[in-house]
Image (cartoon, helix red, strand yellow):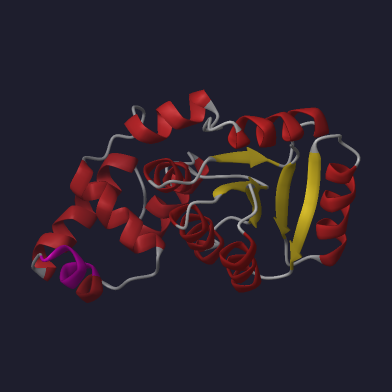
Amino acid sequence: MGIDVLVSDDRRLSRFALAALLERHEGVRVVGSAESNLAALKFAEQHRPDVSIISFEDGDGEALSTAEKIADIGCRSMLLATAVTRSVVRQAFASRISGIVERSVSPRQFVEAIHRVHQGDRVFDAELTVAALNNSDCPLNRREFTVLEYVARGDTVTEIAAGMHLSQGTVRNYISSMVAKLGARNRIDALRIARDSRWI
């Protein structure tokens, strides 16, 4: 039995290149090619491929959500990413997504990851996953880090306060503490430091 694979990428050349690469490997059959996250989800719902490969660019919450939804209907899904932050790894690992593979891996490693996912394994870089789940080198406490994630989304103090069920004054205190701990000039600089460190 071969592995039926769905490839989803909004860039046509990349999508066709991935499909051509996979078709060269015995035991892998590309059964679908989707140009959008919505098309990928619809295909997965209708045809139930063994593994769905969803291309992911930094900050693409829709691709992450699509991979989660595909996993929730009982199909294995994995993200193919140019680069990933720790927050993306945390979210993917906490969901039923089967793995994240970076585009920098070799074709052999990519195909091996598909086989492992098909067999029921989860394919995440061990070092990055441990760092993401622990954030051992991040000086922020859980509340400060949550505020930082809201800042990364572009939320205002009012929106952060509403989302965390805190007063605006408390949120400002967390922001001040966060900025001080990171040695930043302001919250935007704190966000830059966090992104450079791949905490978010």
Drawn side of residue 145 relative to residue 129, left or right: left
- State yes or no: residue 12 in magenta: no
Residue 144 is situated, as x and y percent measured from the top left of the image, at 23, 49
Quadrant location of residue 32? bottom right
Q: Give residue 162's position: percent from left, percent from top.
A: 17, 72
Q: Nearer the viewer, residue 153 or 82?
A: 82
Q: Quadrant of the N terminus?
A: top right
In the displayed structure, 114 sits above or below 29; it is above
In this rendering, is residue 69 above or below 190? below
Residue 147: quadrant of the picture: bottom left
Say how many tags the image has: 0
The verdict on residue 162 being magenta is: yes
The residue located at (14%, 57%) in the rendering is 173
- Residue shown at 83% from the left, 57% from the top: 14
Is the magenta region chiefly helix, strand or loop? helix
Q: Nearer the viewer, residue 125 or 21?
A: 21
Q: Is residue 115 left or right of residue 124?
A: right
Residue 8 x, y percent position in the rendering: 70, 60
Magenta range: 160-165
Could you tell me if residue 135 is visible in this image?
Answer: no
Farthest-out residue, top: 127
Q: Is residue 110 visible?
A: yes
9 to the left or right of 52 = right
Answer above or below: position of 67 versus 27.
below
Q: Residue at x 79, y 52 (%)?
A: 30
Q: Residue 132 vs residue 35: left or right? A: left
* Quadrant assignment, res 183: top left
